[in-house]
Amino acid sequence: MADETRKATLIIGNENYDLPIYSPTEGPDVIDIRKLYGQAGVFTYDPGFTSTASCDSTITFIDGDEGVLTHRGYPIDQLASKSHYLEVCYLLLYGELPTAAELEKFEDTITHHTMIHEQMHNFFRGFRRDAHPMATMVGVVGAMSAFYHDSTDISDPHQREIASHRLIAKMPTIAAMAYKYSIGQPFVYPRNDLDYAANFLHMCFAVPAAEYVVDPILARAMDRIFTLHADHEQNASTSTVRLASSSGANPFACIAAGIACLWGPAHGGANQACLEMLKEIGSVDRIPEFIARAKDKNDPFRLMGFGHRVYKNFDPRAKVMKQSADEVLDLLGVENNPILQVAKELEKQALADPYFADKKLFPNVDFYSGIILEAMGFPTSMFTPVFAVSRTVGWISQWKEQLADPQMKIGRPRQLYRGHKQRDYRDIETR
């Protein structure tokens, strides 16, 4: 609510404009400028919206300076170490941790929505085999609105609920099918006897010719990757989902828009960039050379997977992800994988170097998740699809919250126009 005792006063020429100040439960105060254009005839200018609150939300809070990330008030490290992905999904969707009965019902619902319409298999076969899995996912998720007509009416709370369950349940199936198609292997159907993470790994790595048993350590690591990427406040892809939603678009179109945004290398491709950097380093004995380059201000090389744009202290997700990375590497070993050998040694040397400690350039969640996915056998092209599976529940939670917001309006950012003033058309003979 606005603090009636405090207002921000903007002076333009000889006029004063009082702007309400809102105080959140956590985070900086917010100046309400909604009436500024109507009263003063001016816009604010904020490229990238880095100083603009586009909505109010009760889902996720980030304090980058202190290294804090909470979902509905619960610290991410507690959720990642004590909870599991589907319980976190319930928390994000409904605002509270579920009772045992509520969780059992929710897990059963998601489990029995994991199959996709059989006719949708034809969509995959329409793509080239070398298509990026994210390109496939954008197309297939967008096409869901052509198959699930009974959950596209956003004005119906029941249909919104069904759409939410379908997207959370079917996204791992779609991602796994995109992967299988890209490597020329047959699709593997979901299994109701496996949990969410184990089911995804089974769909990605099982083949009809042999039995595949998911190791519980790998399933737990996969579940943590999902949990630690479930939501991250108003980032680029979440803002894209909200903007698409503001027009009244159906849920499948909104999530497809989020996937398309996430595909951008500046957003969802950080763990892929990290692995590509490790491949560039190539061997353990070259690490000092690249660390020296990272310290050189005149060298464009940067250590990918270290530091974070939002977290100026440390990434609160990284500690839990490091634990999973250590468990996975202990299980699978690094002896025959030079990339993983480089990753382990680079982590060791960087953490021991005062330069990186002073600048708070610690390994972040992308560094460790990339290591885990590489060790599991995922190609780098699948890193962002895994991210999309994880983030689906965050997108949906934000989408549902926005639809329930009585203040929702269609998004319409303004601009600082610097083009030509109005001019007359000239016939081609006179140009």
Image (cartoon, rainbow, N blue to C red):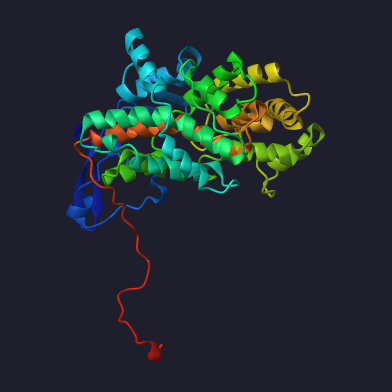
Of residue 320 and residue 191, the one placed in the foreground of this image is 191
Residue 377 appearing in the image? yes
Of residue 126 and residue 90, the one placed in the foreground of this image is 126
Residue 56 appearing in the image? no
Residue at the (26%, 44%) spot, across then down: 248
Residue at the (57%, 47%) spot, across then down: 131
Q: Position of residue 130 (x, y in %)?
A: 60, 47
Residue at the (37%, 69%) spot, across then down: 419
Q: Quadrant of the C terminus?
A: bottom left
Of residue 67 and residue 125, the one placed in the foreground of this image is 125
Of residue 132 and residue 272, the one placed in the foreground of this image is 132
Q: Position of residue 171 (x, y in %)?
A: 45, 32
Q: Residue furthest right?
A: 285
Q: Please determine whether, in this image, residue 78 is positioned above or below residue 258.
A: above
Quarter residue 59 falls in: top left
Quarter residue 304 falls in: top right
Q: Please determine whether, in this image, residue 7 is positioned above or below residue 331.
A: below
Residue at the (38%, 32%) spot, across then down: 167
Q: Residue furthest top?
A: 100
